[in-house]
Amino acid sequence: MAQPSNTFDSYDAVGIREDLSDIITNVSPEETPFHTKCRKTTASNTLTEWQTDALRSSAANAHIEGDETAANAMTATSRLNNRTQIFKNAVTVPDTDEGLDKAGRQREMAYQVLKIAKEQKLDIEKALFDNNAKVAGNATTARELAGAPSWMTTNVNFVSASSGANPTGDGTDARTDSGAPTAFTQAKFDAVMQSIWSNGGNPDSVYLSAFQMNVALGFTGNNNQRSNVQGGDERVIKSLAVYVTPWGTVEFIPSRENRSRDVFIMQDDMWEVAVLRPTKNVELAKTGDSSKRQVVTELTLCAKNEAANGIIADNTTS
């Protein structure tokens, strides 16, 4: 049907008030599972140090009566360290904002500070997973912490072809990525789990990308995931929350911040985040007709004993 002549409709009207929701919808992820699970300790220096040790291998131990006792040869502990890294974000908002009536928030500064604080948490999670060597820093170079891959050498599956290589294991260098990655498999995973068990580890968590998680969903056997049709509806539940092996039970945790080529098998209590400066929202000096605030955190990662953990590196990502 046609509109009657001279109809004054909403397209002709002037002064219609806007219909703007007071809810701001943000779908960006903010989960940081590795940082959340790491034990938090206090750092008192920009260089954080710790020691590791290990028992010798078992040996035959039998002696005759009255034998002279000789002291065992002992080895010193290993002393390791990492550098604290400063994470800093800031926002500047004109003072005109104080007089504006906004939808979704009362004050722009409060909203933006909360937003950059969440973004900084993601930066921290990424740094903990990053294949990065520690940097001591100086007056012109920022300090950087060594990420998890640079510590892991004992329980590792990687591709040595095309330059692939382990790091030294003390945070001074990063892993050398292979230029010829291979697919993540159940066989790789089970082999690293067995190696961790042999070296005394008791892993809890597996961190992996969405792509590698889909590979893990295809693991076979009666000790992993199931697909069940629920009675009364047509939903199919397919999950791999817990994976049971002869070498331990681990929880699979999809992670958005670790590199997709890396799959981490971690014993949670063998990682610590040492915090020199907890996250703080600080007002900066006023230099004009605007207000400035910064969110700053300073911390580092402590690999308490890398032999309790494992990594499956150099996996294909597509």
Image (tube, helix red, strand yellow):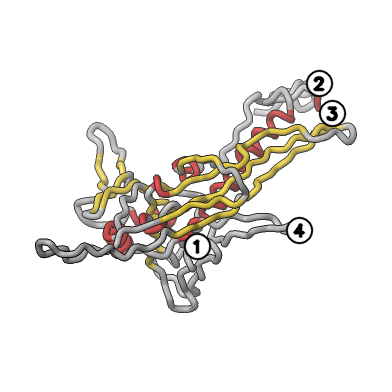
Mark-to-mark CA distance, 1 and 2:
67 Å
Residue corresponding to mark 3: 95
**Foreground: disc 3 or disc 1:** 1
Up/down of 78 relative to 243, above or below:
below
Mark-to-mark CA distance, 4 and 2:
56 Å
Give the tally of numbered discs. 4
Residue drawn at x 41%, y 61% as measured from the top left? 76
Mark-to-mark CA distance, 3 and 4:
33 Å
Up/down of 109 relative to 246, above or below:
above
Mark-to-mark CA distance, 2 and 3:
28 Å
Q: What is the secondary structure assignment of the residue under circle 1?
A: loop
Identified by mark 1, the residue type is Asp
The disc, 4 or 2, on the residue closer to the chain's N-terminal end is 2
Residue 79 appears at what percent x and percent y? 48, 58
Identified by mark 4, the residue type is Thr
Residue corresponding to mark 1: 170
Identified by mark 2, the residue type is Gly
**Foreground: disc 2 or disc 3:** 3
